[in-house]
Amino acid sequence: MLITAPFQREHYISFFDSKEDLLIQVIDQSHKKLLQNALNVNLESTLSPKEKLIKKMLIQMEGFFGEQAFYLDVAADHSGSA
């Protein structure tokens, strides 16, 4: 049985030295995932080079827009604490 709990930022931030360190780790992991997905496209032998390029571009756009809310939230927190 899976029990979900409310998201508490302070809990996750406590594992890092600062919010900035957490953000760096999130960006790093997102970048690694993006690169892995792009490498996986290269392995698809049924796609033409043009189709591979298009698929990689879509992966990149989906990665950015999929995490856009997170980045906007972080930016809002950062601008409010300055």
Image: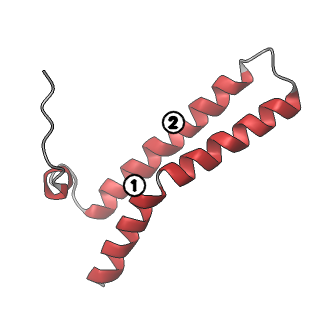
- Quarter where residue 73 is shown: bottom left
User: Local crowd at mark 2 within 10 Å, few (<14), some, or many (≥20)?
Assistant: few
Measured in 3D between alpha carbons, the distance from the residue under mark 1 to the one under mark 2, in whole angstroms, is: 14 Å
Answer with left or right where residue 29 lies relative to residue 12.
right
Q: Which mark is residue 33?
A: 2
Q: Which mark is residue 63?
A: none
Whether 18 is drawn above or below 14: the answer is below
Q: Position of residue 70 (x, y in %)?
A: 39, 58
Q: Classify the position of the N terminus by image quarter.
A: top left
Q: Which of 82/52 is in front?
A: 52
Answer with left or right where residue 19 lies relative to residue 66.
left
Which residue ends up furthest to the bottom in the rendered image? 82
Q: Which of 17/56 is in front?
A: 56
Q: Classify the position of the C terminus by image quarter.
A: bottom left
Answer with left or right where residue 3 lies relative to residue 29.
left
Q: Position of residue 13 (x, y in %)?
A: 20, 55
